[in-house]
Image (cartoon, rainbow, N blue to C red):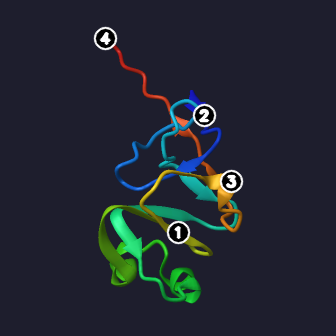
Amino acid sequence: MSKKCCPVFLGGSSVPHGVGTSVSQRACNHLRCTSCDFSMFEDHEWDSCDLCLFFRNNMPDYHKLKVKLRRKRGGRAYACQCSWHSTLIHSDLREQQQLKWVCGEHKSVTVLL
């Protein structure tokens, strides 16, 4: 069984991640872009320069991407081939209207005893 976040939240590495609800408000760690693909990097942020062509050419190769990643304690750097976002704080994805990201579903884990 799988679950989707509703609403979808972003947040820095100090914000717990998992299935987000209006009560739990966890940062989604299974985001998907409706236009391309997606990655998330803990304790980093993106270099602030124009990165559109950079992401289009280098996603999802971490070794190529890391030249534009800066260590940032408490941060999370999100990216797909067409958008990127860095954050330290908890925020509702609906407030970032330029991002075409959705929850890609969280698979439930069944524990057998």
Judge whether 86 appears above or below 32 on screen. below
- What residue is shown with label 3? 94
Where residue 79 sits: x, y (%)? Answer: 51, 69
Residue 22 bears which disc, if any?
Answer: 2
Dot 1: few (<14), some (14–19), or many (≥20) neighbours within 10 Å?
some
Of the image marks 1 and 2, the number of the one nearer the N terminus: 2
Of the image marks 2 and 4, the number of the one nearer the N terminus: 2
Helix, strand, or loop for circle 3?
helix
Of the image marks 3 and 2, the number of the one nearer the N terminus: 2
Residue type indicated by callout 2: Ser
Residue type indicated by callout 1: His
State how far apart marks 1 and 2 are (Cα): 22 Å
* Residue 75 location, quadrant: bottom left
Residue type indicated by callout 3: Arg
- What residue is shown with label 4? 113
Of the image marks 1 and 4, the number of the one nearer the N terminus: 1
Residue 85 bears which disc, if any?
Answer: 1
Where residue 107 sits: x, y (%)? Answer: 51, 35
Tell me whether the residue at label 2 lies in contact with that at label 4, contact meaning CB atoms closer than 8 angstroms: no
Judge whether 103 appears above or below 77 on screen. above
Foreground label between 2 and 4: 2
State how far apart marks 2 and 4 are (Cα): 31 Å
Where residue 89 sits: x, y (%)? Answer: 45, 56
Helix, strand, or loop for circle 4?
loop
Of the image marks 4 and 3, the number of the one nearer the N terminus: 3
Tell me whether the residue at label 1 lies in contact with that at label 4, contact meaning CB atoms closer than 8 angstroms: no
Dot 2: few (<14), some (14–19), or many (≥20) neighbours within 10 Å?
few
Where residue 45 sits: x, y (%)? Answer: 39, 71
Foreground label between 4 and 3: 3
